[in-house]
Every structure is written in C-alpha cells, then in structure tokens.
Image (cartoon, helix red, strand yellow):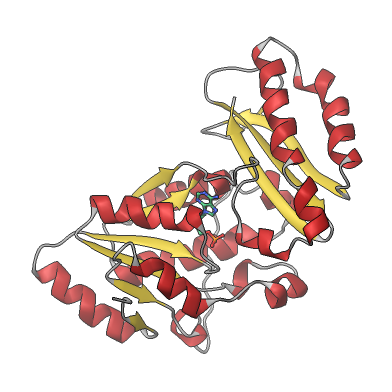
Amino acid sequence: MIAPILRNRADLRAQTAIWRKADETIGVVPTMGALHQGHLSLARAARKKCDRVIVTIFVNPMQFNDPDDLRNYPRTEDADARKLESIGVDLIYVPDADQIYPHGFATTVSVSGLTDMLCGEARPGHFDGVATVVSKLFSQTSADFAFFGEKDYQQLQIVRRMAMDLDIPIEVIGCPTIREEDGLAMSSRNLLLSDRARVYAPVLAEVMESLREKLLAGAAMGDIYPESEARIMAAGFNKIDYLEMRDGVDLSLLQKAKPQARLFAAAWLAGVRLIDNIAV
Ligand code: AMP
C-alpha cells in the first residue's frame, strides 16, 4: 500500500501524537526526493530499527545557492511514493513551502567550523539551509532516530553537531554510500547527466580508489594530487571544487593517511556537480 502523503504540519503532528501515545519509536529519513537505492537503503535501515518510519521529501530552497540548480532539481513525487511502497514506510511528509518557511520566517541555524570547508566553501550558505531545514524537520516529526547517508559525509557531521548543540533528543544514524555497479555514488543529480557524461562520471570514484591505495602505501597527498587532478580533467570534468584528505570527525586537513582519514571530492561534469567520499 502507498503510504499516506501529508502536506501540513498539523496533520503530521496529529499522527505522531498517536504514535507517541502508544510508546512507538519514530524514525525520520529526510530527502529531497528523486529517490534512488541510496535513499531506499536509509528507509530500510529506519524500517529495521523503528516502529514508525517517516520519509520527508522537500526540495529546500534555502540550501540552494544557485537558482538554476533549484529549478532543474528533479521532482518525481509519484514515482517516489511507489518506490517507498515496497519498504512499507508509515508516512510520507511532503510539506508545502509555507509549512517550513511561514510568512515572516526569520531564523537561521548555522553550525560554525565544520561548515567552513569542502562544500561549505564551494556553496556559501548551503549548510545553513541544511541545518535550518533539518532542525525544523526534527522538531516537526518529533522523531527518535534520523537516518542520513555517508554520501554527504560533511552534512552528516554537521547534522550530528547541530542536534547535539541544540539538545534535540534524536539519534543521528549514518548509513553507507550506495553505488552504481560501475562505482558511481548514487545521486539524484546523476539523472541530470547526459549519456556521454554518465560514461565518464565513475572516473571520480576510480581516482579516489587509486589515491587511497597510494595513501595507504605512505604517499603524501600533495605529491599524488597533480596526477589525480589530471586524470579527472582528462575524463572531461570541467572543474574540481576539492579533492582532499581530511579527518573523519573534525574534518581537519591531512597530508598523510591515519585512522579515520577520509577522501573527499567534488567536481563538475557537463554542468552537474558530483560529490563523493570514501574512508582511507
Ligand atoms: P538528498 O535527497 O540528496 O538530500 O539525500 C537525502 C539523504 O539520502 C541524505 O542523507 C543523503 O546523504 C542520502 N543519500 C543520497 N545518496 C546516497 C547514496 N548514494 N547512498 C546512501 N545515502 C545517500
């Protein structure tokens, strides 16, 4: 059965109040829709852990720093609802914009430090938009558990920090990145790639894998970066926003591999910005 779709927070609150009264745990999976196996893996993890599962779909204007990107973002609500059917989620929350940003909305949640680098540097304001909408979804759903993908690893760390700092009583659970067979990390943005660009997109993950091997063998990032950059650009990418090794917890920049080190990359291919990260 397709789960009920609710579009306003009063209806959502009425439903979660019933679940709370029955002492049922609630898991939330925040998404922007155009669901793929990566999103569905989060919904499955929630289904396994929680009595009740809410998937939210909201293309959050506040986290887009480029109006074209917002306009072109894929929207596939009917197909999304059908995909969630097989998992048996309890409710799909697709808030109307005024349910998140009512008239006169004036508050921004801003996490400092973790947002200064990587995507925070390349997309000014992006993580303020994420932290603001996620804090609202946490309070609107009153969930006990929230499921986020490691695919957006910086986002996961920022959301954890935000929930901790604001005393939001929710446990944030990170789930592994789901990939296509050729290694490309699944992303709603992959739908925007032309057939030709799609062929070359996996090169980003391939380069990261070979970087990892060299780093584990003792190489310094600075020494092997130029060759990796050249390989990515030769595959037809137009621009690399970053290709860096950082600590997996505080995201500080690293030159040499160490426990908890991760590689992070963001690069543009034919007008589409792809991101990826792997544990070293
Ligand atoms: P989005 O719809 O892109 O905002 O993503 C919603 C959630 O799905 C976020 O927690 C993402 O990290 C997660 N997600 C996106 N792609 C993947 C993937 N390939 N594997 C695992 N989780 C993912």
Quadrant (top left, top right, bottom left, bottom right) of the N terminus: bottom left
> In terms of image quadrants, where is residue 135?
bottom left
Viewed as shown, does residue 222 lie left or right of 84?
Answer: right
- Provide residue 107's location: percent of width, then percent of height: 51, 72
Quarter location, residue 279: top right
Q: Give above or below for 47 relative to 73.
A: above
What's the residue at 14%, 75% (across, down)? 18
Q: Residue at x 29, y 79 (%)?
A: 12
* Along the line of sight, the residue nearer the viewer: 93 or 161: 93
49 sits to left or right of 72: left
Residue 166 appearing in the image? no
Q: In the figure, 177 relative to 4: above or below? A: above
**Placement of the C terminus among the 4 image quadrants:** top right
Q: Residue 79 appears at what percent x and percent y? A: 49, 75
Q: Position of residue 42 (x, y in %)?
A: 40, 53
Is residue 218 at least partly visible in the picture?
A: yes
Residue farthest along the top direction in this orientation: 218
Callout count: 0
Locate residue 256: give its quadrant.
top right
Is residue 154 shown left or right of residue 139? right
Identity of the residue drawn at 58% across and 61% down: 128
The residue nearer to you, when weighing 237 against 254, is 237
- At 61% from the left and 71% from the top, the residue drawn is 62
The residue at the far left in this view is 22
- In the rendered image, residue 158, in percent from the top left (x then y), is placed at 51, 49
